[in-house]
Image (tube, grey):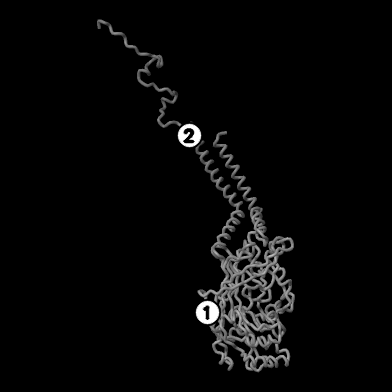
Amino acid sequence: MTRKSCAVYVVGILCACLVITGIGLFVGQVFRHLMHNRLKKEIVLVEGSRVFESWKSPPPPVYMEYFFFNFTNLNEFLAGAKPVLKEVGPYTYREYRYKDNVTMMENNTMVSALNIKSFVFLREKSVGDPAEDNITTVNIPIWAVMNKAKVSYFRSTMANLLINQAKSELFTTRTVHELLWGYEDPLLARVASTSSDVDKVFGLMYKKNGTHNGEFVYHTGVEDYMDYGRVKTWKGQSQLDFWTSDYSNSINGSDGSAFHPFLTKDETISIFTPDLCRTIYMNFEKEVEVKGIPAYRFTPPRAVLASKEENPDNEGFCVSPKECLGTGLLKVSPCRKGAPVVASFPHFYLADDKYVAALEGLSPKRSHHQTFLDLNPTLGVIVRANKRAQVNILIHRISGFYKTKGLNETVFPIMFLNESVVIDDASAVRVKKLLTITVVVSNFPLIIVGLGGILLIVLIVLLFRNCNEKNEVKRIVFTKPSHTSAADEDTSYSPVNEKEKDDPQNGSYIGMTPKSHPQA
C-alpha cells in the first residue's frame, strides 16, 4: 500500500468519525446542556457568582423623570368647565440604587436585603428648576383628610373646622420640589397635633430619598434556576393584606431587578411592586436588539389593570363594591393611609376612553407611555427598561364637606414618572462576550461536523487525483508512440548508420584501415 493510499484511508476514516460524532452530539444537545448547566450554576445570588456584585450594585445608570400636569383653568373648572391640563417636564434625577444589609440565609438558598435608593437632580436633562417652577394641582392633603373623616358626622365636622382654620383649598400651587420631596402642610400640621400617626409634611416622594421600602427575602436560585431572584417575603410577609382575595394579595415574581436565565416567549413575567402594593405581570411582545444584544420585550397587557368585568381576577382589587374603578385604573388607598390615590399608566394609556375624554390635554401614546422590559433570553439580563406610572387623585362630591358640593367624580392626574435604564457599554461588552462563548460552546458539534465536511472535500480531491494518476500510468504503458512505423514493430533496435545495417556480424564489425605500402 502506497503512502497516497494510506492518506486517503486516514482522511476517510477521520471524516466519517467527525461527521458521525458531530451529528450525535448535536442531536443529543450534549454541549448545549453542559453550557446551560454551567450558566445555571453561575447565575445565582451567592457570594463569588458571576452576577452577585452587579445585583448588589447595578452598574448601568438609572434615570427618574417626573412629568407634572399643570391645571390651567381652575376658576372655569369650579364653575363647571372641563379641566384643562398642560404637561410640564421632565424633571430628571439620577437614581442611585444598591442593596444594603445583604445576608445569606438557609444554606445559601435565600438572601435578604434592603433596596436603598437616592436621587440627584440633573439640570441638563430637565426643563427647568424644580425649586422655582410652580404647578397648580389637586391639594392632596385636604382630600386625604376629607376621605378619612367622611365616615362619621363628628369627624367630618371636626375636619371642616380644621380645614377652615388652615385655610386649605381643594387645589393648591406648589413648586415641583415641594410636591416631590415634601412641604409642611398647615392642615396636616393641625391634624398631626391630635393624631400621632399623621405626618405634618407631605410630598409624593417624601422619605423616599436615601431610604428603603422594606426588607426583601429572595430565592438565590441555587435549588432551582427558575427561582433566581424570586421574592419570598416582603416586610416579613409572604402575602399582602391590603386586598380582598388571595390572588390580589399574592407576592409573586421578582422585584424587577433580576430574572431567571433561559426565558421563553410563552412565559409570563411576574413583578412585585411595593409602589402599587401588588404583583403585576408582563407578556412577550416582540424581539428587539440593544447595543448588539438580542432581547425579548415584555409588556403588561391591558388585562393587568382591567375592570372586574373584563378580568374577573381583578375583583379582589376593589376597595369595596362601590369603589371598583374601570379598566386602566387601580385605587391604591388601602396602602396609602386612606388617601384617594389612583394608579394608572401615563395619560391613561390602556384605560377606558372616558377617563381621557373627561380632561383636555391628555394624549396616550404607546411609544411614550408604555411600560416595558427588554431582557436577554439566555442570561435574563435587563438590557433596557422603562417603568412608567401615573399618580391620580379621585375627586368627587363628599357628604359633609361643602367645598365639594359642585364637583363631579373625576380621576385627576397629578404627575407621571418614567424610570429608565439602558445597559452601559462596559456591561454590554461583557454580556456579548459571554453570549459568544455560550453560542460557540453550544454549537461545538456543528463545528465538528464542519471539520468533517472539510475533510470530506479533501478526501474527494485525493480520490480524484489518485484516479487521474492511475489513468496516466495506463496511458503511458499501453498507448503506442505516434512516430512508430510498421517496419519497426518487431524490433526495438535501430541501426545508427548504413554500414551497421550491411554488417553481417550484426554490429560486431570493427573497421580497420590497412597500413599504407611504403611504395604506394
Q: Quadrant of the N terminus?
A: top right
Q: Residue furthest top?
A: 519
Q: Residues within 10 Å of mark 1 (few under 14, many from 20)?
A: some
Circle 1 residue: 129
Nearest to the observer: residue 437 or residue 255: 255
Q: Position of residue 337 (x, y in %)?
A: 69, 82
Q: Amino acid at mark 2?
A: Arg
Q: Quadrant of residue 34?
A: bottom right
Q: Quadrant of residue 7?
A: top right
Give the residue at x 70% y 60%: 222
Q: Residues within 10 Å of mark 2 (few under 14, many from 20)?
A: few
Q: Visible in this render: residue 354?
A: no
> With respect to residue 519, does 85 lie above or below?
below
Nearest to the observer: residue 2 or residue 186: 186
Callout 1: SS? loop
Q: Position of residue 450 (x, y in %)?
A: 57, 50
